[in-house]
Image (cartoon, helix red, strand yellow):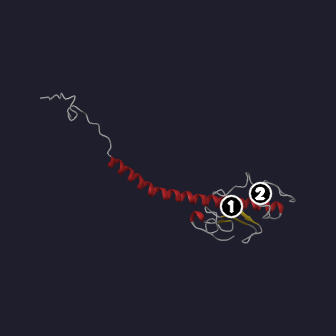
Amino acid sequence: MSTTCFCPIDLRCRCNIKRERGFTLIELLVVVVIIGLLAGLVAPRYFGQVGKSEVNVARAQIDALGKALDQYRLDVGAYPTTDQGLQALVNQPDGVDHWQGPYLQKLVPYDPWGRPYVYKAPGEHGDYDLVSFGADGKPGGTGENVDIKSWESASTGKTR
């Protein structure tokens, strides 16, 4: 037997009404919590790798600048002075003979954190010192804030 509902005015009647069902608030909150937990586990590892890559970029740039400085010294006979700075690798300083530059293909790069490298010649640790003070821009530090120095090897930390 089929029953037919004739109740157009009675709103409590549930006959022949298809009920469409969505997600409950609890289900949505559970999904949001799971996504939050996953982000909390993955994000620190990802951003830790980003910091390590910036330190590696700084090491590679210091190595490249060191090679350009060595080529400058071979041509000119001395490293640029502190006053001449790293710009001597791109523009010929006044009074410098035998300059065969530019020794860099582009302008002198900033470190990965947007600050200029600190150059000093003669250096305290060798013929020159070339330093990036890391993410915090201050001497000392660990992790992303570590100082990247030209006189320390990229892999072992030994002096040159």
Quadrant housing residue 133: bottom right
Q: Residue at x 86, y 58 (%)?
A: 94
Q: Nearer the viewer, mark 2 or mark 1?
A: 2
User: What residue occupies the far left of the structure in this picture?
Assistant: 1
Q: Quadrant of the C terminus?
A: bottom right
Quick check: 89 left or right of 61? right
Among numbered discs 2 and 1, the one appearing first in the sequence: 1
From the top left corner, tell me how far across and down residue 87 is, in percent. 77, 57
| Location of residue 4 (image quadrant) | top left
Mark 2, residues whose alpha carbon is within 10 Å: few (<14), some, or many (≥20)? some
Residue 91 x, y percent position in the rendering: 80, 54
Query: Foreground: 88 or 40?
Result: 40
Provide the residue designation for mark 2.
Answer: 87
Q: Is residue 59 left or right of residue 107?
A: left
Which amino acid is tagged 1? Asp
Q: Residue at x 21, y 31 (%)?
A: 16
Question: Which quadrant of the view contains residue 5?
Answer: top left
Q: Is residue 20 left or right of residue 129?
A: left
Under mark 2, the amino acid is: Gln
Residue designated by label 1: 63
Q: Residue at x 26, y 36 (%)?
A: 19
| Alpha-carbon span between mark 2 and mark 1 | 16 Å
